[in-house]
Amino acid sequence: MSGPEIRNILVTGATGYIGGRLAPRLVISGYRVRCLARHPERLSGRPWARMTEIVKGDVYRNEGLSEALAGVDAAYYLIHSMADTPGFEAVEEESARNFAAAAAGAGCKRIIYLGGPGSDRAELSRHLLSRHKVGKILASTGVPVTEFRAGMIVGSGSVSFELIRYLVERLPVIPAFSCLNSCSQPLAIRDVLYYLAKCLDRPGTTGRVIEVGGASCHRYRDLLRTYADIRGLKRRFIDLKDWDPGLCSAMIGLITPIPRIFAKPLMESLRCEVTCDTSAAREFFPEKEPLDFATAVKYALVRLSEDKVETSWTAAYTPSYARPYTFEDREGMISHAHVIDIGAPASAVYRVFSGIGGKRGWFYGQFLWYLKALQDRLVGGIGMRRGRRHPDLIQQGEALDSWRVERVIEDRMLLLRAEMRLPGKGWLQFEAVPRGEAASTLRLTAYFEPHGLSGSVYWYGLYPAHAWMFRGLALEIKRRAESRLTR
C-alpha cells in the first residue's frame, strides 16, 4: 500500500526521540496523523500536536490500542526499551504481541518498525537481539511489516551522540577499551526520518527488512577522535584491554548525564560489529545519499548552538516537574530547580521576584552574592556594580546587577542571563504558576551550559552552595509574597 491508499497514520512513541520528529513531518506531508501516548500531556506544548489526534494508551497493558488503530492505514512502531532493567525482553515481546494483534484486528494495512542493527547470524547484545525478535513478533499476525535496522543515530539530543559529546568534551584523556575497536555505521537523524517517511510511497518496502546506515564505517575510537577534531579539542587515548560493561557504564554515569541503566546497554553493544548491508536501502531509495559521520556531527552541533533541539533521549525519563526539587543534566545544559507552593496569587509572587537585586539585594545568602561579585571583579568581570534601573519595574533587555533581563512575562515569569565571567553560560529563571485565585506555585530554576571540563568542575564544585542558596531564595520569596498579601 502506498501513495493515495495510505492517508491515515498512527505514530506510537510520539513523545520519544524519533516519534517526536517524525510526526510533524508526516503532518507537513499531508497525512492525517494520530499519536498513541501513555502521557498525552507531554505533547500539549508541541505546536504540531494541535494538528494531530492524540489517544491515550499503553501497548504493554494493551490499553487504548483499538481506539488508536481504528481506521488506520499504516502504523509506526517506535517503541523500545533503552534501559537495562530486569525482564525488559519480556516487556518488549508482550508489547509487540499486543500491538500486532490489535493492528490485525483493526485491518491495518502495514506496520513500519525501527529496529536495531546487525544480521540475525551475528553475535549481538541482549538489547539488539530483543529488537530483532520484536520485528518478528510484529509480522507474526499477517500484517506486512517494513523493518528498518538502523545503526547508531547521530543527531542533537540522541543518546549516542550525547555520549560521544560528553566523553570528548569532559575527558582530556579517554580510556580506549578493546571494545572501541569494533565497527559501526552511524546514521544521521535526518536520514533516519527520510527513510521512515518516504517508505510510505515505496510499495516494494512492504514486508522487507532494510538495513540503513551512514555513508562511512568507523571504529568507535575514530568516532571520538573525529568529534574532537571537529571541536578543535586535543584528546589522548589510553589503551586498556580488559573492560567490564558495568564498570564502564558506572564511569559514564559519573562523567555524562546519561544514567547507568541507559549506558550499560550501549556499552554491551559496543562489542558487536554492526555495519550494515545497505543494498536494499539503495534499491528502494536510490536518490538518497546518507551523510557521513563528520557531517552529521556538524549538523547536530549547529542545532545545539541555535537551541533548536527538537527532541531528546531524555524523553525516556519520567519528567520530574511535579517534585519539589529537581536536578537534571541533559543536552549540555544543567538545570537545578526548586518548586514550592505559595499561599498568594501568581501576580503577588511575580511582584516579589521581579523586584530582586539592586538596593534590595538578592533576598537570601547575600554574602555569597557579594563574594561571587568580588571574585568576578578580580578576574575582570562586571561584578554587581550595575544595579537596576527601577526598584519595581523591569524591562526585557536591561541590566540587573550582573545579569541581563532576557525575557519578561508580566505576572508570570522572569528570565535572567548571567553576564559575569563564567566557564560557560548561565541563566536564572523565576516562574509563578497560578493555582486558583489565591494560590500559586513558584519554580526557581538555575541553568548552566558548561564549557569543557572546567565548566563542569565549576558547577559541581559549587553545587552545595547553589542548593542551599536557591532553596533559601525560594523560601524567602514565599515568605515575602505571603506577608505582603497579609498586609
Image (cartoon, grey):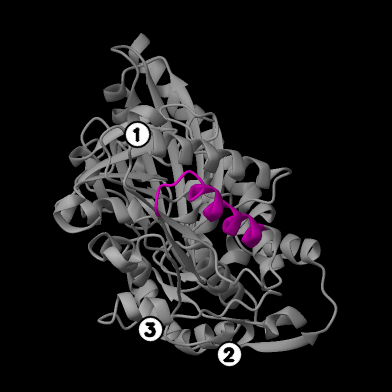
Identify the image quadrant of residue 257.
bottom right
| Dot label at residue 234 | 2
Q: Quadrant of the N terminus?
A: bottom left
Q: Determine the residue located farthest toward the top in the rendered image.
A: 486
- The amino acid type of the residue labelled 1 equals Ala
Asked whether disc 3 touches disc 2, contact meaning CB atoms under 8 Å apart, the reply is: no
Q: Earlier in the sequence, mark 1 or mark 3?
A: 1
| Residue hosting label 3 | 295
Write down the region rendered in magenta.
127-144
Q: Position of residue 156 (x, y in %)?
A: 41, 66
Q: Nearer the viewer, residue 89 or 410?
A: 89
Q: Secondary structure at mark 3?
A: helix
In this rendering, position of residue 235 left or right of residue 58:
right
| Residue hosting label 1 | 106
Q: Nearer the viewer, mark 1 or mark 3?
A: 1
Q: Earlier in the sequence, mark 3 or mark 2?
A: 2
- The amino acid type of the residue labelled 2 equals Lys
Identify the image quadrant of residue 482.
top left
